[in-house]
Image (cartoon, rainbow, N blue to C red):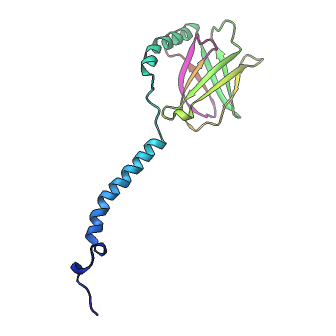
Amino acid sequence: MHREREDLLPWYRQFWPWFVIALPLSAVIGGLATVWIAVDHRVSLVADDYYKEGLAINRVLDRERLARQLGLEADITVRNGELYIRMTGNLGIPPQQLTAHLRHPTRGDWDETVILQRTPDGDYRGSLPELHHANWYLRITDPDHHWLLAGRARLPSRGSLMLHVQG
């Protein structure tokens, strides 16, 4: 049996040229995969209008301060795809509806806004879309945006949770 010497084989039939080509090729493939992941799964942590949001922080603090002065608290329950809120504190004339903003810390496409209508017993109820089990930032406000209750919760939860302004 006659065996050819390795140095007489054409380059494409030898090991080392393919090994040398594979290293930079794997870096190019990894880079393209990274670009694809970055484009497909954008993180919405940075706001386009960060300057305006920075200026608006004083209004948010004023709204939280008013909620603290009124002694507002929200007892929140999630059951059967519904969000129930029982408000306590000095609301005066209770509004006919509340707005609950649910924001995910890193996935802006998961954010939800729920409009809650006042029920005859004085609670508020709204239809809650299907939520991913995760930590959420909650913001509850009246229709005129006079006051604001904000907090964090793991939703959907099995029990109820209390949301009040930290002071």
Task: Find residue 147 and report its horizontal and vertical position in percent.
Answer: 57, 12
Seen at 28% across and 72% down, the residue is 15
Seen at 29% across and 63% down, the residue is 21
Looking at the picture, tell me which residue is in the foreground, 74 or 119: 119
Task: Find residue 90 and report its horizontal and vertical position in percent.
Answer: 63, 8
Can you tell which quarter of the image residue 87 is in? top right
Seen at 43% across and 22% down, the residue is 50
Point out the residue furthest to the bottom here.
1
Seen at 46% across and 11% down, the residue is 58
Looking at the rendering, the stretch of residues picked out in magenta corresponds to 141-160
Magenta region includes residue 157: yes
Magenta region includes residue 44: no
Looking at the picture, tell me which residue is in the foreground, 91 or 107: 107
Looking at the picture, tell me which residue is in the foreground, 112 or 11: 11
Quarter of the N terminus within the rendering: bottom left
Point out the residue furthest to the front here.
10
Figure check: 43 above or below 63: below
Looking at the picture, tell me which residue is in the foreground, 50 or 136: 50
Left/right of residue 149 with respect to residue 119 in the rendered view: left
Task: Find residue 29 and report its horizontal and vertical position in percent.
Answer: 38, 55
Task: Find residue 156 and report its horizontal and vertical position in percent.
Answer: 61, 34
Left/right of residue 57 with respect to residue 118 in the rendered view: left
Can you tell which quarter of the image residue 71 is in? top right
